[in-house]
Amino acid sequence: MDVINVVSLALYAGCRFLVYVVVLIGHRFYLHPLSKYPGPAVAKLPDAYAGIYTLFGCLHLRTYLDLLQYGPVLRAGPNKLVFKSIEALRDIYNNDRVTKSHVYRLTVASGKPSLFNIIDRRHHREKRKLIGHAISDKSLRAFEPTLVEQIDIFLRQLLVASRQPRPVELVVTAALFFYLSRYPEAYRKLAQETRAAFQNGSEIRSGPQLHGCRYLRACIDEALRMTPPVAGTLWREPYANEFREEPFVVDGHVIPPGTQVGVSIYAIHHEPEYFPKPFLFRPEHWLESDPETLKRMNLAFCPFSTGPRGCAGKSTDICCLIGSRLTKYSSVAYMESSLVIAKTLWYFDFKIADGDVGRSGEGRAGRTDGRGRVDEFQIWDSFWSTHLGPNLVFEPRGELWREIEMKA
């Protein structure tokens, strides 16, 4: 093959590729069924836009900022729409004709889908039923002594650290410890409530006394609102052939076939329409006396997702009437958080560690990428959130620490 033929073939291939790119861009920008929806120009091309931000653990922040810039419905990929309304939560996640996106299949290992990534609704119900036996009320009551033993080990470790004294990096309910250490009035109220509710540390266990600590529950919910365990967008799509006769409508928008939809949990949890002053840690949000305001907040609150594909633990919620609010204690997560916080505040006081180590987990003033709020606990979104810090210094309360040593 001579040089002329090689050059000719290269030019031909280059022209074909150029035509493909032009056609692709024209289709994605002007002819695509989602072309009317605003979003970053680069997001309308292949999904590399989301992939890059996922790689750096900040896709939840990028999505939040994009929603602020482009409006309440965002085209976040060639075939993806993101919402941030309670109406979209209902239409997407409480719809039994909608399932997890096909992209969940990429997380299947050894060809055996789990409860997390199974697509078929019948198989999902079967697996969820099996899981339900392990997290029933009876099972949780049987598990509580084991959980308390582990919390006692944690308390003894805090006691050892307090005698140094040296900072402790919290890995349990980390977000709530972070906010309490930076909001002294919330810390004072919670400590006062917890210490007035019990006569000794052994009384702190699951039951009416603990459930009656209204401010404790409000603090847990507020930490979950500000720093949800899953901060990103949980993608969903209709089952095949489900919406042939009836269109798939999300918050008034008719969704074209082949489109993945979802609600940004971080964005809806920081939406001022539902949560006034959303970047302030205000447990009083959850003690709101106006029933309509409280209803709207509860509808927007989805730290463990919602609907039939949400956290399996929610099927065994323990309901408790607190004031005018019917509260749901979502199995292990709430039980663990309540016991850890209540027992820690019974035996210890704590504060932020000195120096740079104490600033671990904070935002940095002046940043424009969503991490510029100093008093917001920073997380990295890789489906399940990861974090650094907080680093706190603990001080025993009086002689109460002797109860901890007696249990050793």
Image (spheres, rainbow, N blue to C red):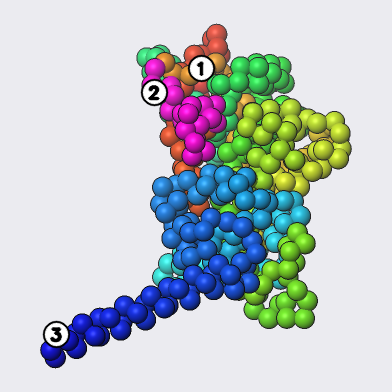
Q: Find numbered disc 2 in the image and state the secondary structure of the residue it sits on.
A: helix
Nearer-the-camera pick, 214 or 374: 374
Question: How many numbered callouts?
Answer: 3
Relative side of 140 to 377, left or right:
right
Q: Find numbered disc 3 in the image and state the secondary structure of the residue it sits on.
A: helix
> Which residue is disc 3 drawn over?
3
CB-based contact (under 8 Å), mark 1 and mark 3:
no
> Which residue is disc 1 drawn over?
351
Residue at (62, 32) in percent of width and height? 279
Taking the view exactly as shown, the residue that stands out farthest to the bottom is 1
User: Measured from the top left, where is residue 162 in percent x and y?
Assistant: 43, 16
Judged by its main secondary structure, the magenta piece is loop
Q: Is residue 100 above or below residue 383?
A: below
Numbered range of the magenta stretch: 355-376
Nearer-the-camera pick, 309 or 66: 66
> Which residue is disc 2 drawn over?
357
Asked if the magenta segment contains residue 122, the reply would be no
Q: Amino acid at mark 1?
A: Lys
Residue at (73, 68) in percent of width and height? 254
Q: Amino acid at mark 2?
A: Val
Rendered image quadrant of residue 3: bottom left
Taking the view exactly as shown, the residue that stands out farthest to the top is 398
- For the N terminus, the image quarter is bottom left
Q: Is residue 100 above or below residue 231?
A: below
Answer with mark 2 or mark 3, whichever residue precedes in sequence: 3
